[in-house]
Amino acid sequence: MLKLPGLIDPHVHMREPGGEHKEDWDSGTAAALAGGFTLVLAMPNTKPPVTDAATFELTLAAAGGKARCDYAQYLGAGADNAAEAAALAGRAAGLKMYLDQTYGPLRLDDMTLWMQHFERWPADRPIVVHAESRSMAATLLLAGLFDRPVHIAHISLREEILLIRKAKERGLKVTCEVTPHHLFPPPPNPPPNLRNLGEGQGGGGGRLEVRPRLNTPADRQALWDNLDCIDCFATDHAPHTLAEKDGPNPPPGFPGLETALPLLLSAVHAGRLTLDDIILRSYTNPRRIFHLPEQPDTWIEIDPDAEWTIHAVDTFTRCGWTPYEGQPVRGRVTRVVLRGKEAYQEGKVTAEPGTGKNVRMMNEEC
Ligand code: DOR
Ligand code: ZN
Ligand code: ZN
């Protein structure tokens, strides 16, 4: 049995408001605890998206009533909300900017809008950017011109990690994260009943539709080779139901909260990672980059040798599937203690809805 700090996931999609049939703050934070995460940062591409005071309050009210683990909520960068978002910055996880097409309407194409947000958003608060390939290069230019930190979400390509290495060498304030699914490709031989699974590896299609797309072996290898430049592991937990994923227009995204740590621990067992690699990227660095408070009396217990098989039926996420169905893994979460109270034990989430705290409001409560 090993004790680790409660893990932090800086990139999850809770789907509430507007997508509660996929996930809500209750099921999503239960999944977080089952996966060993005691603190999650929630993305703003909900329905409606979180772009102003009214939608921010709506989301925080839902989270306040339902969350079982600690959390904070991002604001989304929109076409005309740079001033309003900046005014709410102190209470937000950070600002999320979508520079490429993905799920939801928040994409910003106009570079003058990017600049407005870089000018207004406080320099000491996090900006997280969904920017792939050349938009990522443009983001690095902005980070340099505005001399401010940016965090690049879910890097997946060799060209991206090579550019980030160069940017870091030149002193740009850039950090980045990688998802488990861009390090550990979902199993290659899907059962025949999983109709679309496996089609279009690297290109998308069916259940494997995700943004950024699943990467090629060469891109994946480049991420492993440059792991020293990757600051965080982040699940990009993006639940969509099986019916949606198997429909004619599958939305992009995978659930990830309950499979991330087992996949990472399996890599430790295989000698590809160390436990310190995980603690650095799932606790120490996220705390520093996102200015997160310590969660007192909070830890997780893991059995690093437990051998088991991933099955969606055993998960707490509402979406009802996982791209890792049937994958054997080694290492499991046995117990989670959050702020002195048991929150998860042996397959049962024991933390009640509403007991999670907004870590950006803790000072106000004291
Ligand atoms: O695959 C993805 N799904 N990538 C994203 O950037 C958004 C996410 C979602 O919200 O479903
Ligand atoms: Zn994204
Ligand atoms: Zn995302």
Image: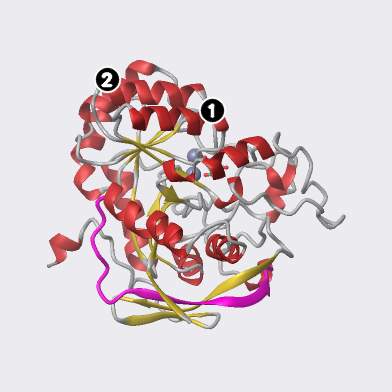
x 27%, y 20%: residue: 145
Residue 316 vs 219, above or below: the answer is below
Residue 8 vs 204, above or below: the answer is below
Query: Residue 346: image x %, image y %?
Result: 53, 83
x 74%, y 39%: residue: 201
The amino acid on which the numbered mark 2 sits, given as a three-letter code, is Leu
Magenta stretch: give its range. 290-311
> Which residue was labeled with disc 1?
159
The stretch drawn in magenta includes residue 295: yes
Write down the quadrant of residue 172 in the picture.
top left
- Residue 250 — which label? none
Query: Does dot 1 land on a helix, a strand or a loop?
Result: helix
Relative depth, front residue between 69 and 156: 156
- Quadrant location of the C terminus in the rendered image: bottom left
Q: Is tag 1's residue or tag 2's residue first in the polypeptide sequence?
A: 2
Query: Residue 9: image x %, image y %?
Result: 42, 56
Q: Is residue 165 left or right of residue 310?
A: left
- Mark nearer the viewer, 1 or 2: 1
Label 2: how many residues lie within 10 Å, few (<14), some (14-19) or many (20+)? few
Query: Which residue, as the protein is rendered here, is positioned at the far right?
Result: 192
> Which residue was labeled with disc 2?
145
The amino acid on which the numbered mark 1 sits, given as a three-letter code, is Glu
Label 1: how many residues lie within 10 Å, few (<14), some (14-19) or many (20+)? some
Relative depth, front residue between 167 and 358: 167
Dividing the image into four equal quarters, which quarter contains ligand 1? top right
